[in-house]
Image (spheres, coloured by chain):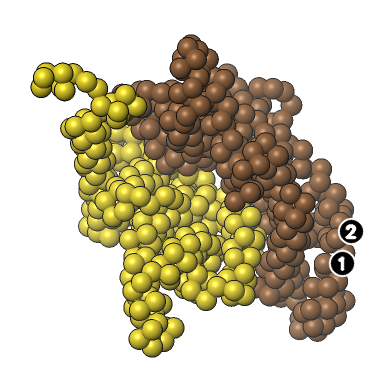
Amino acid sequence: MRRYIVGQLVQLVVVLFGISILAFGILHVLGDPVLLLLPQNAGKEEFERYRHLLGLDRPLYVQYWKFLSRAVLGDFGKSWYADTPAFRLVLERMPPTIYLTLSGLVVALLIALPLGTLAALRRHTWIDSLCTAVAVAGQAVPIFWLGIMMIIVFSVRLRFLPASGYDSWQNFLMPSFCLGAALAPITMRLVRSGVIEVMNMEFIKTARAKGLAEGRVVVKHAFRNACIPVITVLGLQFGQLLGGAIITETVFAWPGVATLTVESIRNQDFPVVQCAVVLLALLIVAVNLIVDLVVGFIDPRIHAS
Amino acid sequence: MPRDRVSTPTRLELAGIAAGPAPAAPSHAAAWRRLLRLRWGVAAGIVLLGIVLAAVFAPLIAPHDPLAVDIRHRLTPPAWMDHGTPEHLLGTDPVGRDLLARMIYGGRVSLVVGVASVLMSTTIGVLLGLGAGYFGGRTDWTIMTIINVMLTFPFVLLALAVIAVLGASLFNMIIVLGVAGWPIYARVVRAETLAIRERDFVVAGRALGMGHLRLIFRQIAPNLLSTIVVIATLQVAQVIVLESFLSFLGLGVQPPTPAWGNMLGEGRLYMLNSWWIATFPGLAIFVTTLAINLMGNALRDWLDPHLKL
């Protein structure tokens, strides 16, 4: 187990290193910060002066090292737009994003667990077919369109729910349903195949042979075991979940990191974009690692192989 | 005593496994299900063909010029509603452009971006996956690390970051989506290559003195074709959704060029009174994505029922 953890940590460092190169390279290799900073009609001397001022005339590896050594300390420079440290701006917007992601996950599980189990137990019946059809259709619905349709129906027509904002629990309903609905189809498929697999196992037969009621067999024995692959895959798909949260945020004007990132892109405020990208990636990597370790703790067979 | 023999259950039957023709039943049912799914796939293919043809022959079938502004008829609702006119079947947008015409033209952007960037990411992903799987060792480690870094990043975030620097345009979007999408191909191709490389015909080829390139491209790669086709098909749908999202944010195809995504983004501003502007382009994205997914699933069942994606 210890060797496994060490291996994971080494990989973590490598991945973080890669992400820092990516974040640095996107601005400094693909683009030119000075071009983004100065107005287009600025003179050539002006460009050179700024380039020198920002240290952009030095070799790339020197610049990268400077970027990295400061980024490790949480210093991504000041926002070009708001004159506050980019790190603080991004950090302030982090909680709403995390809350949205978690509530989306909860909604997805609330939809997927019962439906997936039902589909597995009533395999090859119309219930199963219906669940599969809903899942296939659900996977094709673009999140941002679903969000807008919900706003049109529930906010504009019925005036039930607020279209945007972040003040009360009502504000959470539509965004988390939207995100959850996007994640539910794949989760449902996982639950379904997990339950089917478990139901064929020996210990289910034993439980039945003992004379346990079918409901108890399903809930106590099958369901719990089917959850393990679901947790693993969901945890490892945290990046995709966060990607969905990014899309959802922009539809509901949610005050999270994604909205900030899109605003910053519009304002060409690159330190903030850079910082947001690195912090989100960091979050994903951390969650992946934790999920991996927790799953290994619950089910040691996984890492033995 | 033959009667006794018949009534005595066999050991197999005692174990819950019916002897005789019983096992044939599930496979029969499975065959039916496969056929049914295939039928859905064919239906989806026909729908998709319709969408493609509409996009290709847009100038011939579009009822209006998609860029023709007609302020007098701005925000006209669809034909079946009050104040709708049969002239604008799906209504008009805030400057009076015909929504149906814009949707037909908008399909061009989605399909071009989808196909072009998928071709790009397939090429990159397949080459790197073959390399990693075939050569193994340090090559494999390096490529796998890059794949892990890329897969950690949400696709959306990467695309946003790159667009932020390169600026929004059709060409940049194809590049971004193409470059961001390759890891999934690389991972699958690598895994398959690892398995195939140990098979007898590859070992025999090596023994005959074939070079690396010949082994990779003539011996191994042809076996991966069906897998690659399936992933690529499913990926086109994903790319179309992502392209629409970027255009929706105003970071993709720029107005006045019609694209489903930027029409949807524009519709958002008018959703208070004119629901149709946002609804129909989204419906187009949904139908296209659904058709591609159904076709991809059918293709997978048809080419290789055991393939897990």
Position in image of residue B239 (x %, y %)? 46, 55
> How many angstroms separate mark 2 from mark 1 (CA)?
7 Å
Q: Is residue A27 visible?
A: no
How many marks the image carries: the answer is 2
Q: Position of residue B200 (x, y in %)?
A: 36, 72
Q: At x 72% / y 73%, what residue is drawn? A: A28
Q: Colour of chain A?
A: brown
The reply, left or right, for residue B237 in relation to residue A291 is left
Which residue occupies the foreground of this view, A132 or B116? A132
| Residue located beneath label 1 in the image | A69
Residue sitting at x 30%, y 41%: B88
Chain on which label 2 sits: A
Q: Residue furthest front?
A: B1
Task: Specify few, some or many for label 1: CA neighbours under 10 Å numbering under 14, 14-19, or 20 or more.
Answer: few
Position in image of residue B215 (x %, y %): 39, 80
Residue that mark 2 sits on? A73
Q: Which residue is found at the position 35% from the left and 79% from the top?
A: B204
Q: Are marks 2 and 1 in contact (CB under 8 Å)?
A: yes
Callout 1: SS: helix
Q: Quadrant of residue A22?
A: bottom right
Q: Is residue B145 above or below residue A261?
A: below
Q: Residue at x 53, y 66 (%)?
A: B179
Task: Tell which of A233 and A6 is nearer to you.
Answer: A6
Q: Is residue A165 left or right of residue A247?
A: right
Look at the image and give the colour of chain B.
yellow
**Does residue B161 sit above or below A189 in this rendering?**
below
Badge 2 crowding class, 10 Å Cα cut-off, few under 14, some 14 to 19, many 20 or more, is few
Disc 1 residue type? Ser
